[in-house]
Amino acid sequence: MSELQEATKEFLIESHENLDQLDADLVELEETAAPVEALGRIFRALHTIKGSCSFLGFPHLEAVAHAGEDLLGKLRDGKLELNPAIIDTLLKMVDAIRTMLSAIENTGQDNSGDERGLIEQLNRLASNQQVSGTIAANREPDVRVGGASTDFALAEGIPVHSLDSFPSSLDSKPASTGDSSAVYDASVRINIDLLDKLMAVAGEIVLARNQILQYSQKHDDPAFLNTCRQLNLITTELQEYVMKTRLQPLGNVWNRFPRLVRDAAHACGKKVHLEMEGSETELDKALIEAVRDPLTHLVRNAIDHGIEAPERRLAAGKNEEGCVRLRAYHEGGQVNVEVSDDGGGIDPERIRYRAIEQHLITDQQAAKMSAQTLLSLIFLPGFTTATTVTTVSGRGVGMDVVKTNIERIGGSIDIQSTVGQGATVRIRIPLTLAIIKVLVVTSAGDRYAIPQVSIVELVRVEGEKARKGIQRIHGVQVYRYRDSLLPLVNLNQILQVANNPAEDDAVNIVVLQAADRQFGLVVDRINDTQEIVVKPLWKHLKSVACFAGATVMGNGKVALILDVFGLAQRAGAVSGIQDWSVAAAPPADAHPEERPSVLLIEGRGRERMAIPLSQVARLEEFPRARVERVAERQVVQYCGQILPLIDVDAALRSSLAPARQTAQEQSQDKEAFQVVVYAQPERAVGLIVERILDIVEQDGDVRGPSSRRGVEHTTVIQGQVTEMLDVEELIRTAGEI
């Protein structure tokens, strides 16, 4: 077999270790006066081999192990007395298993010879029958060295050929010496505590390396600089190898879930299949162990609470077989693990009712909670939506424990749900016990580290371009970046520290990716890239969403590692519409003489139109594949809501049935379309436009009459006639009011 599966490799390594221990224990069993403890070890080792054979599909090896287990079970229970014949046969069994393991490693099959004779010997001994061909008590075997026959075997009715594959004498050469395992020889098991210490030492070496490199910048001795470069290369290789010793694929945890899904589905009377993506994603072994139980509960919970019964799924137009999906991927220097289902979703109103019924919240508190806040109530201790207790769930214990265990390792958990379509629970595991590459930036005189995996680009905007290129949407700065408007987040403001006077007129922007969105982080200075050792945060800082960890810089000072997703959430760059509505008020520092700003857009006929910025909540770009239909209207799932879409061009052309326009009316050569989200707290509507041009101030008071329905008036902006849209009228025309 050219390439063994990972599970088979683990089985071979573990089995060879067990066989080495079996050899020693069998010798001890023959010599000791109290063999109970050794018998227990031998029985457990053989039972482990048998169980693994059953799982991996090695029936011949399983049969040998099963026969040996029967014999050992009777010895352990005192039904048989130990004698040399039994010891001899058990040793031959060990050699036979080694031969089969070698065959598995080389050919993928376990039938290396005729094992029936050995099984028959084991069964006869288990039945307390005399077995020929073994060393019987008080009797020497009749064996002729050099090719004599074994007449006693024929007398006992055992075919001679059935014994040819195994040794008739302890003086013969053990089969194990010729069955070397390349997989076993190339592996070594190391205590996890030793790996922890090795990782800590490697981290300290990296820190020392960083300090030496920083010190070397002040010297020009060629020999010293060459030594520093060599130290840098060696340290880099060391840290990579040490990291690999601790990393394991998540598939090692996920291998148990197909059986788990099957059993839980049968217990709930449902049909469920499991899909897994990203099982090759590697994670620190300690973290894998920490997320094992939370993932198990989430999968069981998805089956019991999420997936509907087959008849209900058919009535809803779904396949009667539900789907639970496990997905893992790296993002922002962290590992995301998602557990999703295509079930009925979580109804926020049902959560509200059950939470009040269980006296977890009051009526007044429930009335003020948004849908997303209500979803978070499932993590309260004692909360459950189940009305009856089953073998799977219903006791109100589980989700709170999941949240506690994830937060104990510095992670976070959130849930998204759409009623009737399913739910997704996302676990984000932070950077711990890792050495990563970061970009070091300065803000208010302090240094911070940004994981490089989150960085898209570095942008420096200077002089007049900085003053005119950066605009404000309701107090939120934006910058035109690659034909789109990039929201800006000022790190000094987020951290609530004083702004240092800039050395020049330049603005330093780090373009970051958080979830499926990009935003620009404005910093005072961009320094350089480094490899750092991630240290867990002090427990009192773990609640601060802006930080993912800490590190020691080359100068010996501590620097905090920024949590990109946490920064984006805190700034509202990846949050829902309701968070942006807070920023809809004019900025507190706005001057009365400033003219109102408008968003310039373009129609398919290249008409210039404008929308007051006070009516704009967000600018989006949706892939065409996300468009769905509800009652002949186009909608998209957006920020936990269903966002109706109105094609501005279609609505302006006709008032007969503009809401029924199709995606074919839009440009056919585009895979995505631009949307202006209308800023009204009562409802959200997406306006499909051909192109978003710019954000500008109205530069004149010229007004003309309305040119058509849906246009409030015409005006002149940047020297061109522009239609000022009446968004409320457009919405009424489309039938959304």
Image (cartoon, rainbow, N blue to C red):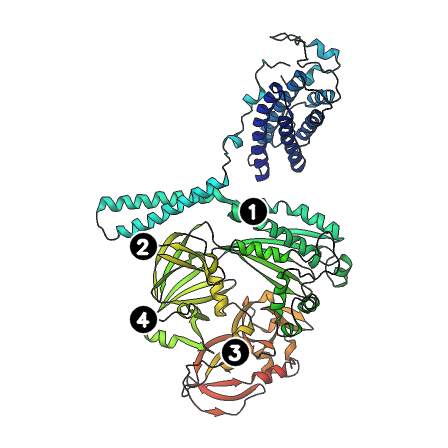
**Type of the residue with mark 3:** Val
Which residue in the structure is indicated by mark 4?
Answer: 502
Neighbor class of circle 3 (other Cα within 10 Å; few <14, some 14-19, many 20+) is many
User: As displayed, is residue 588 above or below residue 294?
Assistant: below
**Secondary structure under the numbered disc 3 in the rendered image:** strand
99 over 396 or under it: above or below: above
The quadrant holding residue 680 is bottom right
Give the Cα distance between marks 3 and 2: 47 Å
Direction front: furthest residue: 34
- Label annotation for residue 564: none
Q: Residue at x 43, y 42 (%)?
A: 198
Q: Earlier in the sequence, mark 4 or mark 2?
A: 4
Which residue is label 1 attached to?
289
Residue 555, labelled with which disc?
Answer: 2
Q: CA distance from mark 1 to mark 3?
A: 46 Å
Q: Position of residue 218 (x, y in %)?
A: 24, 53
Left/right of residue 709 with respect to residue 80 in the rendered view = left
Is disc 1 in contact with disc 3, using a CB cutoff of under 8 Å?
no
Foreground residue, 484 or 294?
294
Q: Mark 4 belongs to which amino acid?
A: Ala
Disc 4 secondary structure class = loop
Give the CA distance from mark 1 to mark 4.
47 Å
Q: How far apart are the two marked residues, 4 and 3, measured between alpha carbons?
A: 31 Å
Q: Earlier in the sequence, mark 1 or mark 4?
A: 1
Q: Is residue 385 above or below residue 677?
A: above
Q: Could you say which disc has been placed on residue 616 in the image?
A: 3
Quarter of the image for residue 12 reads: top right
